[in-house]
């Protein structure tokens, strides 16, 4: 992508099933993007894009032309990227020297970010059965960039890689050896988010950063990570993104007998069960209203209130399990959309963890302060915003040796 007169920069792409988060970062260093973008509602006629400057302020942005395929209900990630990447280059005035991608699953082989070539693409495609609702979209972004800009170096940054440090026993599932040998084990996810938090713990927690810390990544997808010495030692998500916490649309840990009942007794087919587990469960399923915590907290519906109460209850239970795995708890960190902005959820979880020594400062919590525990608390609670895109930029620079 030579020919653009400007400073060298790294393009970061965090691609989901209906959205693309993108950022342009300095090629040498820095965690703040020169320019960032969010494309939403892909696959619908309402697909649109917003741009933000380094301070996070929204910028005026052209929208995909209404008379093009951008308004088609079959609108693809490739089409958006073909329009969005030149827009980012033009508006930021940079020369793109690399692209870094969030890839959800790296399997057992990839424990760090890697430069993408044909063999890497082939290996990551083999992992699609382990993450059907996530893996294809990250790979679609890789292929879209390769197709239009084949000379641009690309890097895969994995959500599973951060959990390479968990123990062998924490990885195991209690199935037969032939099944285990096919790669059925616990992997863990949200690793890019946890990597960001871990990198900032020493500055925020001081000496406590070396101790036993649980990070609660609470978004539409949600998980916990138990850290010791800023390294992953336990995680609530396992083989898939279904295990662990109750989520926006996913149930979290579920008795597998229920799945058999759905198939055998209720006559549901495989795709119906998959849709139920990934799109119609969790907050959305229990409330019958929404997967958006803001909507549920504002609702007077008894089912909405029950969904919120169950969400907190399940989080407290899972925190207890992770605390058992790491031998106790010194600090509890909240991050991601719900973790950063839903004060009532944080309050319920911290109060539910009082048996571990967690304490809450209600005023600090209501203000979304960084430290939300009173002085002298045995277990301190914090709110730390996550930044997956900055981690992708860091890992892309390292993988291609772009750092000065």
Image (cartoon, grey):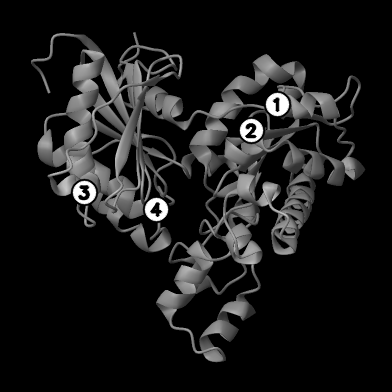
- Counting from the top left corner in percent of width and height, residue 271 is at 41, 75
Evaluate if marks 1 and 3 touch, with contact meaning CB atoms under 8 Å apart.
Answer: no
Residue at (59, 85) in percent of width and height = 261
Residue at (41, 58) in percent of width and height = 131
Evaluate if marks 4 and 2 touch, with contact meaning CB atoms under 8 Å apart.
Answer: no
Q: Which numbered dot is residue 71? A: 3
Residue at (63, 80) in percent of width and height = 257
**N-term-proximal mark, 3 vs 4:** 3
Disc 4 on helix, strand or loop? loop
- Counting from the top left corner in percent of width and height, residue 2 is at 10, 18
Q: Which numbered dot is residue 368? A: 1
Q: CA distance from mark 1 to mark 3?
A: 38 Å
Q: CA distance from mark 3 to mark 2?
A: 33 Å
Disc 2 on helix, strand or loop? helix
**N-term-proximal mark, 1 vs 3:** 3
- Counting from the top left corner in percent of width and height, residue 149 is at 12, 33
**N-term-proximal mark, 1 vs 2:** 2
Evaluate if marks 1 and 2 touch, with contact meaning CB atoms under 8 Å apart.
Answer: yes
Q: Nearer the viewer, mark 4 or mark 1?
A: 1
- Counting from the top left corner in percent of width and height, residue 260 is at 57, 83
Q: Disc 2 marks which residue?
A: 340
Q: Which numbered dot is residue 134? A: 4
Q: Quadrant of the N terminus?
A: top left
Q: CA distance from mark 4 to mark 2?
A: 23 Å
């Amino acid at each position: 992508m030579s020919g653009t007169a400007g400073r060298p920069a790294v393009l970061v792409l965090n691609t989901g099933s209906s959205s693309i988060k993108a950022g342009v970062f300095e090629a040498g260093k820095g965690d703040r993007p020169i320019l960032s973008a969010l494309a939403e509602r892909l696959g619908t006629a309402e697909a649109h894009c917003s741009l933000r400057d380094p301070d996070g302020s929204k910028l005026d942005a052209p929208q995909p032309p209404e008379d093009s395929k951008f308004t088609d209900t079959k609108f693809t990630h490739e089409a958006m990227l073909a329009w969005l990447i030149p827009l980012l280059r033009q508006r930021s005035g940079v020369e793109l020297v690399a692209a870094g991608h969030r890839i959800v699953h790296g399997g057992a082989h990839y424990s760090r970010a890697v430069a993408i070539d044909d063999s890497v693409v082939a290996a990551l495609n083999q992992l699609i059965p382990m993450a059907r609702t996530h893996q294809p979209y990250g790979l679609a972004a890789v292929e879209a960039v390769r197709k239009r800009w084949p000379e641009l170096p690309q890097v895969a940054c994995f959500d599973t890689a951060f959990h390479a440090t968990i123990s062998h026993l924490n990885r195991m599932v209690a199935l037969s050896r032939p099944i285990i040998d096919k790669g059925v084990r616990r992997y863990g996810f949200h690793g890019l988010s946890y990597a960001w938090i871990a990198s900032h713990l020493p500055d925020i927690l001081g000496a406590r950063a070396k101790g036993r810390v649980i990070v609660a990544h609470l978004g539409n997808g949600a998980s916990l990570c138990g850290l010791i010495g800023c390294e992953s030692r336990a995680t609530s998500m396992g083989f898939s993104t279904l295990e662990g916490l109750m989520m926006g649309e996913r149930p979290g840990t579920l008795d597998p007998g229920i799945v058999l009942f759905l198939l055998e007794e209720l006559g549901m087919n495989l795709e119906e069960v998959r849709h139920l587990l990934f799109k119609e469960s969790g907050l959305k399923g229990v409330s019958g209203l929404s997967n958006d915590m803001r909507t549920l907290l504002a609702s007077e519906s008894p089912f909405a209130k029950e969904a919120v109460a169950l969400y907190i209850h399940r989080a407290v239970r899972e925190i207890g399990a992770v605390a058992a795995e790491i031998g106790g708890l010194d600090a509890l960190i909240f991050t991601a959309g719900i973790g950063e902005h839903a004060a009532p959820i944080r309050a319920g979880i911290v109060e539910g963890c009082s048996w571990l020594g967690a304490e809450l400062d209600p005023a600090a919590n209501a203000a979304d302060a960084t430290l939300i525990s009173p002085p002298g608390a045995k277990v301190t609670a914090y709110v730390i915003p996550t930044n997956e895109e900055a981690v992708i930029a860091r890992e892309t620079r390292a993988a291609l040796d772009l750092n000065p």
